[in-house]
Amino acid sequence: QVQLVESGGGLVQAGGSLRLSCAASGSMSSIIVMGWYRQAPGKQRELVAVVISGGNTNYADSVKGRFSISRDNAKNTVDLQMDNLKPEDTAVYYCYCNAKIREFTFQYWGQGTQVTISS
């Protein structure tokens, strides 16, 4: 099992910044993908940004140039720096990882952290 613990959500005004952090712990051989998704009220969960173990990143078009993801493979942590936040960024943000345990891979989710941007 893998546990993901998130921190860093909150309420900020439009144009402000927030930093989300996530730490993974548990019995795993390696983490293949680690990153963030979000879900706004009435909408489906969507990818925000992920980083693959080799270092490649993938961002949603809506956050490119504003958000930056970083990962520490040694510590199994991932951070999301969010700048120039907009009201449409308001959502519950979930940490995600795809981890390898023995010969199998599993997906895990954090409990979610609320991000609210006021206009």
Image (cartoon, helix red, strand yellow):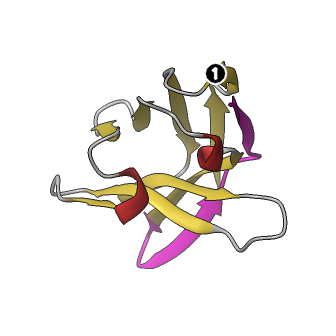
Farthest bottom residue?
A: 104
Give how far across and how far down residue 106 sits, in percent.
55, 72
Q: Please state the total of marks drawn on the protein image.
A: 1
Quadrant the C terminus occupies: top right
Asked whether residue 37 is drawn in magenta, I would say no
Give how far across and how far down residue 114 sits, in percent.
75, 37
Q: Residues within 10 Å of mark 1 (few under 14, many from 20)?
A: some
For the point 74% across and 58% down, the residue is: 40
Q: Is residue 64 visible in this depiction of the protein?
A: yes
Q: Which residue is mark 1?
A: 13
Q: 72 or 9, which lies in front?
A: 9
Q: 35 or 118, which lies in front?
A: 118
Give how far across and how far down residue 64 sits, in percent.
30, 52
Q: Quadrant of residue 69?
A: top left
Above/below status of 69 relative to 55: above
For the point 62% across and 61% down, the residue is: 108
- Three-letter code, disc 1: Gln
For the point 50% across and 65% down, the residue is: 47
Above/below status of 94 relative to 83: below
Lateral position of residue 6 relative to residue 55, left or right: right
Give how far across and how far down residue 4 sits, in percent.
63, 43
Farthest front residue?
A: 119
For the point 53% across and 30% down, the residue is: 20
Quadrant the N terminus occupies: bottom right
Lateral position of residue 87 relative to residue 101, left or right: right
Q: 90 or 2, which lies in front?
A: 90
Q: Magenta span covers which residues? A: 100-119
Secondary structure character of the magenta stretch overall: strand
Asked whether residue 112 is drawn in magenta, I would say yes
Q: 111 or 47, which lies in front?
A: 47
Q: Secondary structure at mark 1?
A: strand
Q: Is residue 30 visible in this depiction of the protein?
A: no
